[in-house]
Image (tube, rainbow, N blue to C red):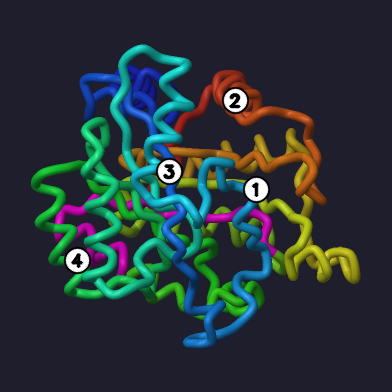
């Protein structure tokens, strides 16, 4: 009975993001990435240097994101790209590169407003660190969400402080808990971003993470497999000593994702399972599969195992 009710409500065996988006918006909506020239506190010396060991922003930044181009022009170029595929769309400006709240609030307002001034932009998605939000910023976003869609995406990456130290995040998991609590209390949409496969972690750690995250006021969840990119500190670490790294096969990751889903609070919207980087930047893993092919494998395996998100969730 629980299974049938869940599948009837969500149309799939997990709480999928496209279905949620269709409920929120009456028309097709697409994110367009923006690079506003931010940096991070673990790059500029305020908390650390060198950035996260896994990070190469070029692995996910579209070609139209260019620091020499004003925000409004980046938005327009992104819109031009997507409008070739669809006749009628609206857009969310996605401040994706580095830490999207790492500036004085006055400057953030200017940049966000510049993107929102485009007549086809109906909201913001802001990617940031959990230690880079302030009461002043939260007050502004609380007011802004009354007029447009607002989502704050927090790079949490792991629930283990030892891992956060290893990957040079320079914040704690408690910072993440606080950020999720503060946005939730103010009714601001939030998203938790987590990486499965970080060095030194085990399968038990990843499944415990699902339990831990399920206890928090997380609205959306982005998961992806650890990817080792060229030009990162992690590339050097991996080439020197691959032993601490667990490089998943596509089938192994599929099974892990399903086990994770079974423990996950069914109210959490799953926005992403995997990430796909340009081939010329990727060291490992090299699956040779598109994102939608991995999602299809997960959905097929859920059906084969007759299981669903939250089947083992304990509130």
- Between disc 3 and disc 2, the foreground one is 3
Instruction: Give the labeled residue for mark 2.
Output: 292
CB atoms at circles 3 and 1 under 8 Å apart? no
Instruction: Give the labeled residue for mark 3.
Output: 74
Element under label 1? Answer: strand
CB atoms at circles 1 and 2 under 8 Å apart? no
Badge 4 or badge 1: first in the primary sequence: 4
Q: Quadrant of residue 165?
A: bottom right
Instruction: Assign the N terminus to one quadrant of the image.
Output: top left
**Dot 1: few (<14), some (14–19), or many (≥20) neighbours within 10 Å?**
many
Instruction: Give the labeled residue for mark 4.
Output: 138
Give the x, y percent position of residue 224.
59, 46
**Dot 2: few (<14), some (14–19), or many (≥20) neighbours within 10 Å?**
few
Instruction: Give the labeled residue for mark 1.
Output: 225
Q: Going by the image, does 309 lie left or right of 136?
A: right
Give the x, y percent position of residue 179.
31, 67
Badge 2 or badge 4: first in the primary sequence: 4
Q: Which residues are magenta?
A: 179-198
Q: Is residue 32 magenta?
A: no
């Amino acid at each position: 009975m629980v299974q049938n009710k869940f599948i009837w409500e969500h149309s799939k065996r997990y709480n999928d993001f496209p279905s949620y988006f269709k409920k929120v918006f009456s028309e097709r909506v697409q994110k367009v990435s923006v690079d506003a020239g931010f940096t991070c506190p673990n790059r500029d010396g305020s908390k650390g240097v060198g950035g996260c060991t896994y990070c190469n922003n070029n692995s996910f930044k579209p070609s139209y994101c260019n620091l020499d181009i004003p925000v409004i022009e980046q938005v327009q170029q992104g819109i031009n790209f997507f409008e070739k595929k669809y006749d009628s769309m609206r857009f969310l400006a996605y401040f994706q590169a580095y830490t999207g709240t790492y500036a004085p609030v006055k400057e953030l307002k200017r940049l966000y407003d510049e993107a929102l001034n485009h007549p086809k932009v109906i909201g913001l998605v802001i990617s940031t660190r959990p230690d880079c939000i302030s009461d002043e910023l939260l007050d502004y976003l609380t007011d802004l969400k009354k007029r447009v869609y607002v989502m704050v995406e927090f790079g949490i990456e792991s629930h283990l402080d030892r891992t956060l130290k290893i990957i040079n995040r320079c914040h704690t998991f408690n910072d993440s808990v606080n950020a999720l609590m503060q946005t939730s209390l103010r009714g601001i949409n939030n998203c938790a971003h987590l990486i499965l496969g970080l060095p030194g972690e085990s399968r038990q750690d990843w499944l415990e993470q699902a339990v831990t995250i399920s206890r928090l006021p997380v609205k959306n969840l982005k998961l992806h497999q650890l990817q080792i990119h060229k030009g990162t500190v992690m590339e050097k670490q991996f080439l020197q000593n691959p032993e601490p790294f667990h490089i998943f096969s596509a089938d192994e990751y599929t099974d892990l994702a399903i086990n994770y889903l079974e423990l996950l609070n069914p109210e959490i919207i799953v926005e992403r399972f995997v990430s796909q980087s340009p081939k010329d930047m990727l060291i490992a893993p090299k699956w040779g599969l598109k994102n939608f092919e991995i999602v299809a494998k997960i959905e097929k395996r859920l059906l084969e195992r007759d299981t669903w998100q939250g089947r083992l969730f304990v509130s």
